[in-house]
Every structure is written in C-alpha cells, then in structure tokens.
C-alpha cells in the first residue's frame, strides 16, 4: 500500500495508526515498515515523535519515489 500520511491526510494517518498498533505482528512476521511522506524533514520528525519513532520516516517532497 502507498500511504501519504502528511498532516493533511487524515485517512493516511488513521492507516498509519493501525500499522503502529500492529507493529508487534509485523516484527513477528519478520517485516519492517518504512514510511515515506511528501512532508519535509521537520514535519517527519514530529510525525516520528507521535509514533514513538517505531519505524523510519523518509521524505520525498518532490514525489519522485511515488512516481517510480
């Protein structure tokens, strides 16, 4: 799934909260969650703090990764 959970994407944030609540299941399955947003580094740091830095949050402000 491709999520774009910036602060303005409430549905994406809800999905991210669901992933966060099941991070133990991901770990048990040997899976990792890496989040990519279109937000800048500062916004991503705030998002990471909200989710206890449970997974890496990368920035793609120009949308290059999403295009690929």
Image (tube, helix red, strand yellow):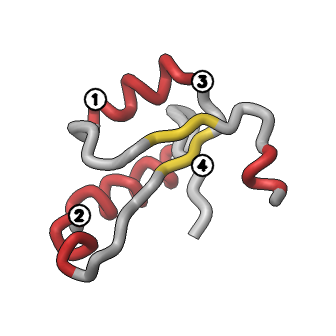
- Image point (34%, 73%), residue name: 31
**In front here: 62 or 4?**
62
Instruction: Answer few, some or many: residues within 10 Å of disc 1's Cα (few below 14, many 20 plus, some between 14 and 19).
Output: few
Residue annotated with mark 4 = 4
Instruction: Answer few, some or many: residues within 10 Å of disc 3's Cα (few below 14, many 20 plus, some between 14 and 19).
Output: few
Residue annotated with mark 1 = 49
Q: CA distance from mark 3 to mark 1?
A: 14 Å
Residue 15 lies left or right of residue 40; in this view the side is left
x and y, in percent, of residue 25 in the image: 20, 75
Q: CA distance from mark 2 to mark 1?
A: 16 Å
Instruction: Check disc 3 and report its element: helix, strand or loop.
Output: loop
Q: Which picture quadrant has residue 28?
A: bottom left
Mark closest to the chain's N terminus, 2 or 4: 4
Mark whose residue sits in front, 1 or 4: 1
Residue 13, placed above or below residue 53: below
Residue 42 lies left or right of residue 48; in this view the side is right
The label shown at residue 58 is: none
**In front here: 6 or 56?**
56
- Image point (21%, 60%), residue name: 21
Residue annotated with mark 2 = 23
- Image point (57%, 56%), residue name: 3
Residue 23, placed above or below residue 8: below
Instruction: Answer few, some or many: residues within 10 Å of disc 4's Cα (few below 14, many 20 plus, some between 14 and 19).
Output: many
Mark whose residue sits in front, 2 or 4: 2
Instruction: Check disc 4 and report its element: helix, strand or loop.
Output: loop
Instruction: Answer few, some or many: residues within 10 Å of disc 2's Cα (few below 14, many 20 plus, some between 14 and 19).
Output: some
Residue annotated with mark 3 = 40
- Image point (27%, 72%), residue name: 26
x and y, in percent, of residue 53 in the image: 27, 38
């Amino acid at each position: 799934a491709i999520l774009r959970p910036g602060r303005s994407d409430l549905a994406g944030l809800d999905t991210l909260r669901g992933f966060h609540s099941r991070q133990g299941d991901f770990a048990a399955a040997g899976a990792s969650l890496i989040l990519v947003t279109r937000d800048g580094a500062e916004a991503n740091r705030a998002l990471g703090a909200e989710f206890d830095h449970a997974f890496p949050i990368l920035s793609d402000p120009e949308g290059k990764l999403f295009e690929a």
